[in-house]
């Protein structure tokens, strides 16, 4: 356990936990984590914005496949950046069989993010993925591993096949991932495959296999991971329902609260005593981002804590500055309360939202948005009558979703998280030449606690402030 960090910085939304934040945390000896979700899209948009500061070019300097790097760069880089009123280039959506250009973009993008996070220090850096975003997993993992990622963290699903994929990719061997496909009376599976040698431009020595931490919300899932995963599981992040982002649904059919939020009970609590019997290190997440929370976690036998919300609002995070300022001002005024929305996510999982004015958390703001699914990360794969695979999203136009066999009730209240999360970091798409995508910020229920980190006169704080406060090295 002594080889692992005490504090894991959470993987926050889409690139809120960017390389800058992860590097700042890692330099201080804790685990900085970049978000790998939609990193291909993030990288392509950064290039279209002209690569301000030259960071993406610098991150590519050590990339081993130079022809691939050149293809990606030439395809997306716009010197000086695109015009502000021009939309970002539309990328072909991921599907089980490619396209190859998206695989290359995933490799390059994840490499650059991890490489930049590792600059200037020798400490490990992690990368976080959502299991539900299945198709990009293998090329994304390979890119992160080429850059020397030390940890892979994954939740929002059951990542039984990730450990084996890490083993294979470390040897540059073909890897496969079972993709969930809804169809008929029961779920079916199809396989996504990735063969590194089809992308390599020369031989490379074996890569370091990163530690794999599964993000779990139940003892059953932890035990399942240990017994049934196709490779080594190195530990767990135990994420309770107060954590930001996607939450596991409550066990059982509990009614919603008067406020319309899911109600969690004793069945949703992880028995830490039983978890310890598995003999693997674990970190507690969801409401543990305080000095008291860290002490409580260590006393319970945890290796430490995973902290998200305090880092999401610190100076180094990539969340839009106007969003940060508005949220922190509301926190200081005692006016901010996070809402656990049971409908917002197309995945069907509850999703924490911050009721920030001017964002799509407000129903009237979202009502102005044309119903479009043009990124597709949270699409559901389903079996076509022909036997092939189709893709649908509960946030796409209702008629389109119904024509694909989707249930009408699943469209109610759904929001396009893909576009909203990109808007959170200043990479908003312009739709149909007019509508500019608006953000949807997510934080944990402990949002009010970030007031304790505000020590700077301008109402801000750094990642170093968060770590020092948690470890008790700052008053």
Image (tube, grey):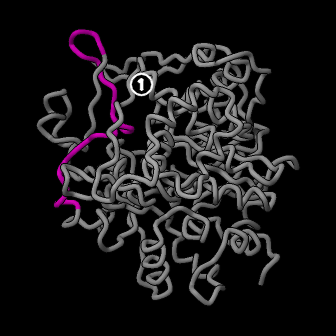
Helix, strand or loop at label 1? It is: strand
Please provide percent x and percent y for residue 50.
47, 52
- Is residue 423 inside the magenta stretch? no
Please provide percent x and percent y for residue 194.
55, 18
Residue 83 seen in this snapshot? yes
- Is residue 378 inside the magenta stretch? yes
Q: Residues within 10 Å of mark 1 (few under 14, many from 20)?
A: some
Q: Residue at x 28, y 22 (%)?
A: 390
Q: Residue at x 31, y 18 (%)?
A: 389
In this picture, which residue range is highlighted in magenta? 366-388
Q: Which residue is mark 1?
A: 180
285 or 386, nearer to the observer: 386
Residue found farthest to the right: 2
Q: Determine which quarter of the picture holds residue 255.
A: bottom left
Please provide percent x and percent y for residue 90.
32, 39
Q: Residue at x 58, y 13 (%)?
A: 198
**Is 378 rendered above or below residue 451?**
above
Please provide percent x and percent y for residue 401.
18, 34
120 or 328, nearer to the observer: 120
Residue found farthest to the top: 386
Majority secondary structure of the magenta segment?
A: loop
Q: Determine which quarter of the picture holds residue 236.
A: top right
Residue found farthest to the left: 399
Q: Is residue 397 left or right of residue 156?
A: left
Q: Is residue 222 left or right of residue 84?
A: right
Residue 266 seen in this snapshot? no
Q: Determine which quarter of the picture holds residue 32.
A: bottom right
Quadrant location of the C terminus? Answer: bottom right
């Amino acid at each position: 356990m002594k080889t692992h960090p005490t504090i894991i910085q959470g993987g926050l939304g889409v690139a809120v936990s960017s390389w800058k934040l992860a590097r700042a945390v890692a330099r201080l000896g804790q685990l900085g984590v970049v978000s790998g979700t939609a990193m291909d899209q993030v990288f392509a948009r950064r290039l279209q914005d002209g690569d301000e500061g030259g960071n993406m070019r610098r991150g590519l300097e050590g990339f081993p496949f130079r022809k691939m790097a050149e293809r990606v760069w030439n395809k997306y880089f716009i010197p000086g950046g695109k015009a502000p009123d021009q939309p970002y280039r539309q990328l072909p959506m991921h599907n089980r069989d490619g396209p190859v250009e998206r695989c290359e973009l995933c490799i390059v993008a994840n490499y650059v993010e991890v490489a930049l996070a590792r600059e200037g220090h020798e400490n490990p850096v992690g990368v976080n993925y959502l299991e539900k975003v299945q198709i990009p997993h293998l090329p994304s993992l390979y890119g992160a591993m080429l850059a020397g990622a030390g940890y892979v963290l994954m939740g929002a699903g059951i990542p039984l096949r990730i450990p084996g994929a890490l083993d294979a990719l470390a040897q540059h061997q073909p890897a496969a991932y079972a993709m969930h496909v809804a169809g008929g009376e029961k779920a079916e599976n199809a396989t996504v495959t990735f063969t590194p040698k089809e992308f390599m431009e020369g031989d490379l020595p074996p890569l370091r296999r990163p530690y794999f931490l599964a993000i779990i919300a139940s003892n059953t899932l932890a035990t399942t991971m240990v017994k049934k995963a196709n490779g080594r599981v190195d530990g767990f992040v135990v994420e309770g329902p107060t954590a930001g982002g996607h939450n596991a649904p409550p066990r059982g059919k509990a009614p919603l609260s008067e406020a319309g939020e899911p109600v969690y009970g004793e069945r949703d609590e992880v028995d830490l005593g039983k978890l310890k019997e598995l003999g693997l290190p674990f970190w507690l997440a969801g409401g543990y981002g305080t000095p008291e929370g860290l002490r409580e976690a260590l006393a319970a036998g945890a290796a430490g804590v995973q902290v998200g919300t305090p880092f999401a609002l610190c100076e180094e995070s990539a969340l839009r500055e106007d969003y940060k300022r508005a949220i922190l001002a509301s926190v200081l005024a005692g006016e901010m309360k996070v809402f656990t929305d049971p409908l917002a996510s197309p995945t069907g999982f509850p999703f924490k939202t911050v009721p920030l004015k001017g964002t799509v958390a407000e129903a009237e703001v979202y009502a102005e948005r044309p119903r479009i699914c043009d990124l597709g990360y949270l699409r559901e794969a389903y079996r076509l009558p022909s036997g092939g695979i189709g893709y649908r999203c509960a946030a796409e136009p209702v008629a389109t979703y119904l024509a694909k066999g989707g249930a009408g009730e699943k469209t109610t209240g759904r929001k396009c998280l893909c576009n909203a999360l990109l808007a959170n970091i200043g990479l908003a798409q312009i739709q149909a030449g007019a509508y500019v995508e608006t953000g949807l910020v997510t934080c944990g229920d402990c949002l009010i606690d970030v007031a304790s980190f505000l020590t700077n006169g301008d109402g801000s704080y750094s990642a170093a402030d968060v770590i020092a406060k948690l470890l008790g090295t700052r008053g």
